[in-house]
Image: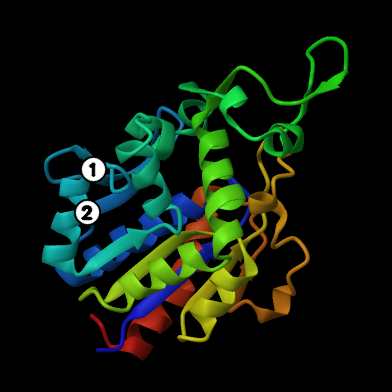
């Protein structure tokens, strides 16, 4: 069975997650022949809204919601970080919100401290002391985002540069879903592994984060040739609705091409 796989790339807060949820809700509405599902913002996070019973569906951290979408509609949103997040939750004891929540949740302190990290890692994540500008190696408690960056990039990717991409694509192309979105391509191999298997890759250009993040997971695709992408959307000055209207115009054609309605 041929499946439509759409992979999103862009800076944090560029609209990748909201775009994935729009695509899923639009696809399900097309299957049902009625506008039942829509994308809404609530508490600075994006959710799918079910207008039939006025419920809010969290498809990132609610495993029951994910299973329902898969079993009923054969669609799902994956993240290259899903397996990493499960390690952080199940093995390291992080809260679900510190891995799947909004930016403010991911930036909350965990129980893990920087002094448990090797010196070269602490030096790599050095940061300015507030009020003085003096740059010091990282210390104190690590945030959920910092844990995921260190474990994902500085540990696992050092062992195998393609571990997260390979694991995710192996799962995607062995499941029974017809439409799949991947919300967080951050490295060239995550893009090329997808295009080699006919995935559609979409780059969103908005960068709304107030604080610049120079971690490699945020910058690795900065110089990646944009001509290689299936679609580039300059959404820097677009509303979420305007961005989704552009996506809809392409999605309508892709759904016909893949004959999955």
Image x and y of residue 51, in percent: 19, 45
The residue singled out by tag 1 in the image is 62
In front here: 109 or 121? 121
Q: Work out whether residue 190 or residue 207 is closer to the camera in this orientation and state it.
A: 190
Question: In the rendered structure, are the residues bearing label 1 and label 2 in contact, judged by CB atoms less than 8 Å apart?
Answer: yes
Q: Residues within 10 Å of mark 2 (few under 14, many from 20)?
A: some
Given the current orientation, which residue lies at the most extreme right position?
Answer: 133
Q: Compared to 202, does 193 lie above or below?
A: below
- What distance separates the C-alpha of mark 1 from that of mark 2? 7 Å
- Examine the image and state in which quarter residue 170 appears: bottom left
Q: How is the image coloured?
A: rainbow
Label annotation for residue 66: 2
- Seen at 52% across and 86% down, the residue is 196
The circle drawn on residue 124 is: none
Residue 86: percent from the left, percent from the top? 34, 46
Position of residue 261 measured from the top left corner of the image (x, y, whole percent): 23, 80
Q: Residue at x 18, y 63 (%)?
A: 70
Give percent across and percent down for residue 61.
29, 42
- The answer to which of 160 and 229 lies nearer the viewer is 160
Which type of secondary structure does the marked residue at label 1 adopt?
A: loop
Residue, far top: 131
Residue at horizontal 56 percent and vertical 26 percent from the top: 142
Q: Secondary structure at mark 2?
A: helix
Q: Seen in the image, is 127 located left or right of residue 73?
A: right
């Amino acid at each position: 069975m041929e499946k439509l796989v759409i992979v999103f790339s862009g800076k944090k807060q560029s609209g990748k997650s909201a775009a994935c949820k729009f695509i899923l809700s639009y696809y399900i509405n097309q299957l049902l022949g009625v506008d039942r599902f829509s994308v809404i913002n609530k508490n600075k996070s994006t959710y799918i809204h079910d207008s039939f019973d006025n419920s809010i569906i969290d498809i990132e951290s609610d495993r029951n919601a994910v299973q329902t979408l898969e079993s009923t509609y054969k669609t799902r949103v994956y993240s290259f970080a899903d397996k990493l997040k499960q390690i952080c939750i199940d093995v390291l004891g992080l809260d679900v919100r510190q891995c799947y929540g909004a930016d403010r949740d991911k930036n909350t302190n965990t129980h893990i401290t920087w002094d448990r990290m090797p010196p070269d890692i602490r030096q790599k994540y050095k940061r300015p002391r507030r009020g003085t500008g003096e740059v010091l190696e990282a210390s104190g408690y690590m945030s959920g985002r910092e844990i995921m960056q260190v474990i994902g990039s500085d540990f696992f990717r050092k062992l195998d540069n393609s571990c997260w991409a390979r694991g995710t694509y192996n799962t995607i192309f062995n499941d029974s879903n017809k439409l799949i979105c991947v919300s967080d391509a951050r490295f060239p191999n995550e893009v090329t592994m997808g295009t080699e298997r006919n995935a559609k890759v979409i780059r969103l250009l908005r960068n709304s984060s107030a604080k610049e993040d120079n971690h490699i997971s945020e910058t690795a695709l900065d110089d990646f040739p944009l001509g290689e992408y299936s679609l580039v959307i300059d959404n820097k000055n677009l509303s979420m609705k305007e961005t989704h209207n552009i996506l809809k115009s392409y999605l309508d054609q892709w759904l016909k091409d893949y004959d999955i309605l």
